[in-house]
Image (cartoon, rainbow, N blue to C red):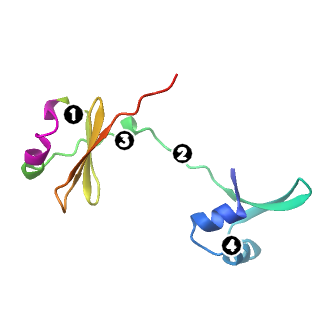
Amino acid sequence: MERIPLNKYAKMKKMSRAQVIHMIVKGEIEAEEVEENGKKVRYILVEKKQTQPIQQQKNDTPIPETVLVHIRKFVDISSMKYCYEGMHDYYMAFENQLLIFNKESAVVTVVPKCEEKE
């Protein structure tokens, strides 16, 4: 289980501290109180989410021809590794960059690959 401070949990859930405390009292969420540096600090206990790497969530979405017309200006489509279709965008992963194509505005955003520090 992951421990999240009450204030941070309230911000994360867009709730007031009082609402979170009320949920603790009702038993809707688990919490623990710890003494740190002479102060009582309340933590919310949350299950850790199991996240899967993107490669395991491979989803080769076929790209419509209208989208391909805009994208060909930026990259060679044959070098594409993955394509994901979101609610408003197509996400296309290449070796050295990520292309995000907005379905509504037809705007293509190119994001270069980050360099890994050793």
Q: Is residue 83 left or right of residue 67?
A: right
Q: Which residue is mark 1?
A: 80
Q: How many discs mark residues in the rendered view?
A: 4
Looking at the rendered image, the disc whose residue lies closer to the viewer, 4 or 2, is: 4
Tell me how far mark 4 sits from mark 2, CA to CA.
24 Å
Q: Callout 1, which amino acid?
A: Met
Mark closer to the chain start, 3 or 4: 4
**Which label was assigned to residue 5?**
none
**The magenta stretch spans which residues?**
68-78
Dot 4 alpha-carbon crowd within 10 angstroms: few under 14, some 14 to 19, many 20 or more: some
**Residue at the spot x=65%, y=61% of the render?**
8
| Residue 15 versus residue 33 in the image, above or below | below
Closest to the observer: 22 or 12? 12
Looking at the rendered image, the disc whose residue lies closer to the viewer, 1 or 3, is: 1
Q: Which residue is mark 3?
A: 57
For the residues bearing labels 1 and 2, Cβ distance under 8 angstroms: no
Tell me how far mark 1 sits from mark 2, CA to CA.
27 Å
Residue 45 position in % (x across, y down): 70, 57
For the residues bearing labels 2 and 3, Cβ distance under 8 angstroms: no
Q: Which residue is mark 4?
A: 20
Looking at the rendered image, the disc whose residue lies closer to the viewer, 1 or 2, is: 1
Tell me how far mark 1 sits from mark 3, CA to CA.
16 Å
Closest to the observer: 59 or 118? 118
**Residue at the spot x=40%, y=33% of the render?**
114
Q: Quadrant of residue 26?
A: bottom right
**Residue at the spot x=68%, y=72% of the render?**
20
For the residues bearing labels 1 and 4, Cβ distance under 8 angstroms: no
Residue 67 position in % (x across, y down): 12, 50
For mark 3, give the secondary structure: helix
